Image (tube, rainbow, N blue to C red):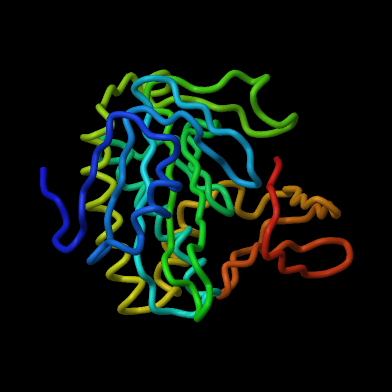
Amino acid sequence: MSWPAGYGRRVMAEIDSTNAEAARRAGMMAGPEWICALNQTAGRGRRGRAWTMPPGNFAATLVMRPREAPQVVALRSFVASLALYDAFAAATGRVDGLALKWPNDVLLNGGKVAGILLESLGQRQGVQHLAIGIGVNLVAAPGANEVEPGAVRPVSLLSETGARIAPEEFLDLLAEAYALHEARFVTYGFEPIREAWLARAARLGEVITARTGRTETTGTFETVDGSGNLVLTTRAGRQAIPAADVFF
């Protein structure tokens, strides 16, 4: 199994959080680096939610020094989603049941199998470093009582496909896939990434609900625009939503 040139690889037995370790190491790195933990004691999901990690599951962070404006840097959540999709396909030999949920989850047979958390590290002159944290339910998934009411049910790769893969092996698949999509993103911009993501999108053309802490918008999932916004067609017209949790 190959490893992409120019990317560092660090596998640790136990750590509090791979994103926290990325923040500690960012200033010392010569180039982009993957940090993988076999056990994570204080993992985090979006909006500060806890991310539990049973033994055998996957937790890793890619930390890099991006060159683009912050709004462009944030589009790497789509790059990471595509890389996860390809890594799952490589691990199982199939794409049946795989779909991408805006803004940054991967679904398998309708359940959430992976999530992505982007964090900016230092913003004095744009984003100094970017941490792309990725959690995958390789062998076990949280119970329904551990997720927000109405959220997509958690599933594991093992329970849904019977495929068993070690975290270090999955890291190799993910890193190779990410490097390919990152090169395309840097060379050609967001448009080819957007098109590829939409071709794998969950519930495209269907009615979904986008919720923030203050608002709830229900409409038909029309597209993702060139800025990465979720575009819904609602009774009030076409609305572009930059950040929300999606329910369906």
Which quadrant would the C terminus be assigned to in this image? top right
Taking depth in this image into account, of 61 and 106 the one nearest to the observer is 61
Name the residue: 67% across, 65% down: 242
Quadrant, the N terminus: top left
Left or right for 186, reference 159: left
What percent of the width, then of the height, locates residue 92? Answer: 28, 32
Residue 90 placement: quadrant: top left
**Residue in the image at 71% along x and 42% along y:** 247
Residue sticking out furthest to the left: 1
Q: In this rendering, is residue 37 above or below 25?
A: above
| Residue 130: x %, y % from top left | 43, 63
* Image position of 246 (left or right of 16): right
Q: Position of residue 212 (x, y in %)?
A: 77, 52
Asked whether, in this view, residue 131 is left or right of residue 241, the answer is left
Vertical relation: 141 (above or below) 30? above
**Residue at left offset 68%, top offset 50%:** 206
Most extreme residue toward the right is 236
Q: Is residue 84 left or right of residue 73?
A: left
